[in-house]
Image (cartoon, coloured by chain):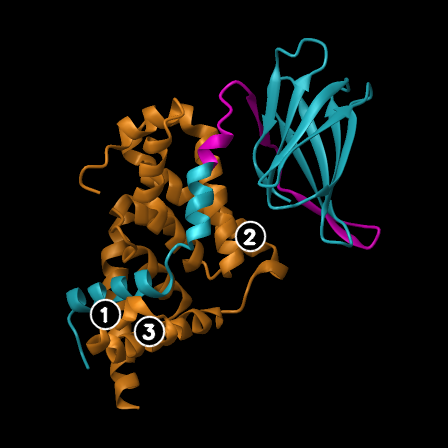
Chain colours: A cyan, B orange
Amino acid sequence: MSMDDEELGQMLRDLLAASDPVPPPSMQAAYEAIGWRDADSELALLAAEPAAAQLRGGQSQLLTFSSGGLVVDLEVAEANDGSVRLVGQLDPPHAAEVTVESAGGARWVRADDQGRFAADGLPGGWTRVVVADGATRQTRTATEWFLA
Amino acid sequence: MADFDPEGALAAAARGDQHAWESIVQAYSGLVWAIARGYQLSAADAADVFQGTWLRLVEHLGDIRDAARLGGWLASVARREALALLRQASRSLPVDDLDRVGGGVEDTGAAVDTRLLRAEEHREVWQAFGRLSAQCQRLLRIVFADPPPRYEEISAALDMPVGSIGPTRARCLASLNAQLNQVTAE
């Protein structure tokens, strides 16, 4: 069997569409992604290549996000039960309301006046942290999405 | 995709228009998925790359200035996310994940039933495809994504100059034809 490029290409296109389509749950999640639009927050960008660290026998990654005036340091660790634990540090240190958002929903925690916060039992997957300044509530900063 | 207007859709989606957003996802979902799978990620990791790409677009909806380059932008993001996942070696899958996908061709119901006459041909093409180099498999998956991507988008997806795409595509299709002859002779 031999075909010209046109025939072969068309057959390949049909074949890929039939045998490896975008899974419907992924299409649905993509349609719903617009719900995470947050035009009012300042975006804190991932500053450096994430460093992998070995902590207490488990795998964890260290991520640093920064926007104009705020640095958010995160340690993302996987617990034994497969859930994710997040420990964070705000720089400059200050009290704030912190929301951890993921496909599983949103979790609210407080950063203490040293700028420390933690959340555990998180579902993993795409996650971001939104920091609302405790004093003014005017400034909100959202980290980029990261895979936890 | 002829009536898809990226500029209008981007502007409307930035205002939260669900319908406009879905039209963007529909226009580029085939390309983004082909990139994730082209880098030989498992279905689960490919789903992460796919979702991550849309989340990044939502993050940046307000600051994409050149709507005509939206597809290229998405392709670059998908490629970057795929490579980031590949670097986490434990999450990457061996190449023979493709065989598993290919195996689905024979037992996928309706889609293939409608083309019974071509089923055997399909199986052979798929088998031949699985014997190509990883580079050729990736390029062909992306080139023949549905709807067909433009050259700038393919270029961004592969980090390859536009001028190299045509010749590489021709070379990979020639390899596919050669493998196909071998498969049918076996």
Q: CA distance from mark 3 to mark 2?
A: 26 Å
Residue at 65%, 42% in the rendered image: A50
SS of the residue under disc 3: helix
Tags 3 and 1 touching, CB below 8 Å = no
Give the residue type at disc 2: Leu
Give the residue type at disc 3: Trp
Residue B126 circle label: 3
Pick the quarter of the image with the C terminus of chain B: bottom left
Q: Are marks 3 and 2 on the same chain?
A: yes
Decide: is B31 above or below B129. Answer: above
Decide: is B97 above or below B138. Answer: below
Residue B114 circle label: 1
* Residue B116 rendering spot, x and y as whole percentages: 23, 76
Q: Are marks 1 and 2 on the same chain?
A: yes
Q: Are marks 3 and 1 on the same chain?
A: yes
Label 1: chain letter: B
For disc 2, the marked residue is: B85
Q: Nearer the viewer, residue B125 or B113?
A: B113
Query: From which residue to which does the magenta span run?
Result: A33-60
Regarding residue A101, the answer to whether it shows in the image is: yes
